[in-house]
Amino acid sequence: MAAEDVVELVIAPRLRDIGDFAVRRILPFARRRMVGPFIFLDEMGPVALPAGHGLDVAPHPHIGLATVTYLFAGEIEHRDSLGSVQAIRPGAVNWMTAGRGIVHSERSDAAQRAEASNLHGLQSWIALPLEHEETAPGFSHHAAEELPVIEGEGSWMRLIAGRAYGETAPVPVFSDVFYLHAELQAGARVALPQEHAERALYVVSGSVDLEGRVLDAGVMAVVKPGPAATLTARSESRLMLLGGAPLEGRRHIWWNFVASTPERIEEAKADWRAGRFAGVPGDDDFIPLPQD
């Protein structure tokens, strides 16, 4: 099948400054706001942090989504308004359900700051279905060894969340979704999961061929629904495969808030401005509400 029959859109990330360093913002994109329930995707790093420096994302609120943090290198300490304190390391998953509202911070701890370190990973937001938009907030951590691994000839994949290739991850998802970390040797071939309505891949490093379309590091390809699609690694490559069923209706996104109505966004803005969100125990700092 020709590449133009498989690839719907190629997205080149935009650089965004988050204070400590720049990230690559992949989603949302002007011509493609979501892929399945994925509404936000950032690649952090790779960045070398000198001794005495670290990641410092002060407490900030979320509604209407679940955050998924996944690292290739480094360590981040997560704290939230539920009292959760959890270091995340490469291969593990921190899944935080915001629902009706949660506040969290992401920082490097004292041990990480004491010496030079590297940080590299992805932060994604998965919008919640209507019936779960106002669910109770929650936090779930899963070590790397808890997650299913799918291996083939020259290929290795870890299922971060959802279902794919006959496996289901233990992460508590709220909709039909798949999210995989793939490592491919040169020449390895992998067929994308065909059972999901919306599919995409992001090339973290290396280069792949997707049914005749060459995709190099730092781009996302959104695949058209339906057709079988096989990618071939042109060199040793690292990818993220993601997608799932589209949600019912439009989702609005403003700052850290996702909702099915603009009114709910305005309510969350007012609540943060007025200090009505719960705080993060052990972290009294906060990020002020941005100006509209």
Image (cartoon, rainbow, N blue to C red):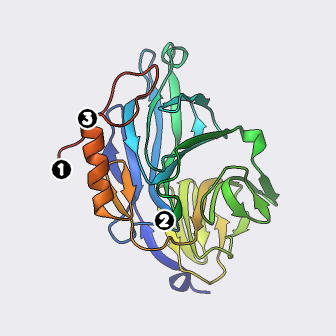
**Residue of label 2:** 130
Q: Position of residue 104 (x, y in %)?
A: 45, 34
Is 172 in front, or is 198?
Answer: 172
Is 213 in front, or is 175?
Answer: 175
The residue at 38%/40% (across/down) is 61
Neighbourhood count class around disc 1 (C-alpha, 10 Å): few under 14, some 14–19, many 20 upward: few
Could you tell me how far apart the alpha carbons at marks 1 and 2 are, in whole angstroms? Answer: 26 Å
Decide: marks 2, 3 in contact (CB < 8 A)? no
The residue at 66%/81% (across/down) is 228
The residue at 72%/67% (across/down) is 189
Mark 1 or 2: the one toward you:
2
Left or right: 111 with respect to 60? right
**Residue of label 1:** 292
- For label 1, the SS is loop
Q: Quadrant of residue 92?
A: top right
Could you tell me how far apart the alpha carbons at marks 2 and 3 are, in whole angstroms? Answer: 28 Å
**Residue of label 3:** 288
